[in-house]
Amino acid sequence: MSVGQGINRKRSSSIWQPLRIPLFRNLLLANLVSDIGTFMQNVGAAWLMVSFRVGPAYVALTQTAAALPFFLLAPIAGPAGDIVDRRKLVLSTEVWMLIAAIAIAVLAIGHAMSPWVLLGLTFALSAGDAFEAPTWRAILPELVGKDELAAASALNGIEFNFARAVGPALAGLVIAVAGVSTAFVVNAISFVGVLAVIAMWKRSAVAPRGPRENLGGAIVAGLRYVRFSPQIKAVLVRQGASMFFASGLLALLPSLAHSLSPSAIGYGILLGAFGAGAVLGAIALQPLRSLWSVEAVVSGGIAIVAAGMIAMGTVRSLAALLPVMLVAGAAWICFVSLTSALMQTLTPDWVRARVLAMFLFVFQGSVAIGSAVWGALAQRVGIHSALHWAGLGAMASLGLAFNFRIPNAAADLSPGIHARIPAILEKTSAEDEAGPVLVTVEYTVLPARREEFEKLMKRYRLTRRRDGASRWEIFRDIENSDRYFEVFLSPSWAEHLRQHERETKSDEELKNQIRSCIMEDPTVRHLLYTS
């Protein structure tokens, strides 16, 4: 669980500057220990399942159990992270995960573990992480200043990938020397540092910018934002398709390693090589981005991972697998980190946790489903053949670039200057949820700019729908062809107030283009529904 994983487009000479902030530094160190424990837990769970001799399908299900909660809980985890106290949410989920980790360790020590109990507790442990993850990523701007945000994101990426490199190798050594239960004990202990740092964090109260959202409304708003954001949908489609196939790499690796060497050390070394490759990939990512577009780097990373899976299904020795895992790890981090960072830059502050939750929903859902599919296929046709098919599928997913191209940059999504809105006369506290609200905007368009105006309004439709309108239409007066009426519905007066608060500088630029096409300021009317 990393505070945030982003890619800095511009290399900074002050990458270590955020370490001067005690809270960030302490949390980064606590995260490093916790992430190492998490990777040790993952290796231990996969290896314990292998020791039950239940076949590769069950082994792959350990990754499904770890990923499925992100798929199931994301729709409510993101909204919760945007509307509740983030510090309390993180504390609660950390305590939940500590309890689940202790249960796994105790049952393993007492030799009372079974395949289905292991899957259930792995699911419970991951459920805490899934509910916490969107909030965890969203708190990064609260820990450091705006100027240090990029450097802090880079440091978190280094921390996470260092843990990925060290944790699996350390787990293999610990399991070989002291048994798998020791790895589970280490993971349980690793939660203590994060709990201590978060408990001591005196978080400043954050006043809501508009009427407070309820959970149901926040869920709808998050889904609506994704639905009417073409760039975000493009990233989600590409990420989901590529991860469905790429999940075969890590899902089948335990079974492949066990078939080549009976010792857990070999599996740990292979995962360590994968993590080391990820660190190298993170270092190489900035030079690659200076040469190629985001689409080129992401597609290249997917292609290399696909080739790596095909190679895994071909080689027959651990020594030959090491360079394959190293290169695959570097390619993996390129497309995963770039798409993760892009999702943050494509999303304004008010809905960031919800969109990140949707990203995790697609990412982990693809991993969960893909792991189960490739495990079942390996059970039927063999591990090597399943890896070949997964690699070919990942290569074929590159064809989606024709219709779902990864954007190269994001618009300016910082808050804009909000337009004046009328107050409800004789307003009561209940009026905030009154509605729906019908808003009409009358434009008088310059005759020579009508075609341009209509094209701009089609783009503006996405902005209106994304920020809160449940319906939107544009009409032209048949008696005066220069007069247009924009009409849209907001579910309630409170939601319309939020719609004004959600406008960004990018929206302002579009509005200015629309204003250049009209003769005078538009006439706006707000009509509140009465039964």
Image (cartoon, rainbow, N blue to C red):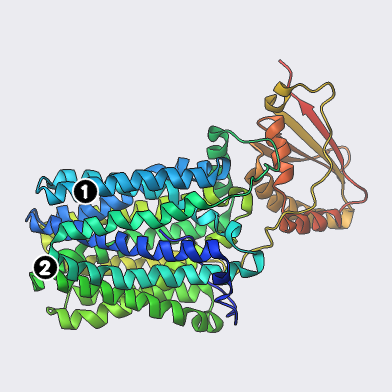
Image position, residue 21 (x, y; %): 58, 66
Given residues 504 and 458, the one toward you in this image is: 504
Question: Residue 344 falls in which quadrant of the image?
Answer: bottom right
Q: Residue furthest top?
A: 531
Image position, residue 338 (x, y; %): 48, 69
- Residue at horizontal 9%, vertical 58%? 51
Which quadrant is home to the C terminus?
Answer: top right
Decide: is 47 above or below 102: below
Dot 1 surroundings within 10 Å: few (below 14), some, or many (20 or more)? Answer: many
Question: Residue 171 falls in which quadrant of the image?
Answer: bottom left
Examine the rendering and report whether any part of residue 285 can be seen: yes
> How far apart are the alpha carbons under marks 1 and 2?
23 Å
Image position, residue 411 (x, y; %): 66, 63
- Residue 528 is left or right of residue 228, and the answer is right
Decide: is 445 above or below 26: above
Element on which disc 1 rests: helix
- Residue 280 is left or right of residue 385, and the answer is right
Of marks 1 and 2, which one's residue comes earlier in the chain? Answer: 1
Which quadrant is home to the N terminus?
Answer: bottom left
- Residue 423 is left or right of residue 462, and the answer is right
Dot 2 surroundings within 10 Å: few (below 14), some, or many (20 or more)? Answer: some
Image position, residue 17 (x, y; %): 58, 74
Q: Are marks 1 and 2 in contact (CB under 8 Å)?
A: no
Residue 104 circle label? 1
- Residue at horizontal 40%, vertical 71%? 333
Q: Which residue is mark 2?
A: 258
Given residues 56 and 279, the one toward you in this image is: 279
What residue type is disc 2 on? His
Q: Residue furthest right?
A: 520
